[in-house]
Image: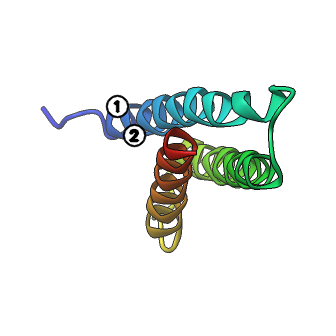
Amino acid sequence: MSPDPGASAERTRLAWRRTGMSATAVCLLAARPAFRPDAGALTWLTAALAMAAWVAMIGLAYRRSYALRRTPPQPARRAVPAYALIAATIAVLGGLVVML
């Protein structure tokens, strides 16, 4: 009996969703210092970049999730490297917020 080909696509889709949810938490925490009364321009810029990266990540995850729902699932050509780059950018911005 062959394994279900849809199960791996579903697991991958759920992994993309989990990563997007984690990025949401990091970006919200990165934006939080911008709402202090003494927040400077660098803090606002970091928060804005984090939110822009988050929007790009969620948009990419939505497109990839849609491609995984098709039969057969569409291969990820540039989505995975782009997603990794955005995730690394969010991590760097989160670290920058901690150092500010």
Q: Position of residue 32 (x, y in %)?
A: 71, 27
**Which residue in the rendered view is the most extreme toward the front?**
38
Q: Position of residue 50 (x, y in %)?
A: 68, 48
Secondary structure under tag 2 reads helix
Characterize the local packing of mark 1: few (<14), some (14-19) or many (20 or more) Cα atoms within 10 angstroms. few
Q: Quadrant of the C terminus?
A: top right
Q: Choose between 80 and 9: the one closer to the eye.
A: 80
What residue does disc 1 label? 7
Real-space Cα separation, disc 2 to disc 1, in angstroms = 9 Å
Query: As drawn, is 9 to the left or to the right of 90?
Result: left
Which residue is pictured at 80% across the width and 26% down the height? Answer: 36
Which residue is pictured at 62% across the width and 28% down the height? Answer: 29
**Which residue in the rendered view is the most extreme toward the right?**
37
Q: Amino acid at mark 2?
A: Thr
Query: As drawn, is 30 to the left or to the right of 80?
Result: right
Query: As drawn, is 12 to the left or to the right of 23?
Result: left
**Which residue in the rendered view is the most extreme toward the bottom?**
78
Q: Amino acid at mark 1?
A: Ala
Among the 4 quarters of the image, the one containing residue 88? bottom left
Characterize the local packing of mark 2: few (<14), some (14-19) or many (20 or more) Cα atoms within 10 angstroms. some
What residue does disc 2 label? 12
Q: Position of residue 98 (x, y in %)?
A: 50, 39
Mark 2 or mark 1, which has the lower sequence index?
Answer: 1
Which residue is pictured at 80% across the width and 38% down the height? Answer: 39
Q: Could you say which disc has been placed on residue 54 in the image?
A: none
Compared with 28, 77 (above or below) is below
Q: Choose between 13 and 57: the one closer to the eye.
A: 57
Among the 4 quarters of the image, the one containing residue 86? bottom right
Which residue is pictured at 48% across the width and 55% down the height? Answer: 92
Q: Position of residue 57 (x, y in %)?
A: 63, 50
Secondary structure under tag 1 reads helix
Count of numbered circles in the view:
2
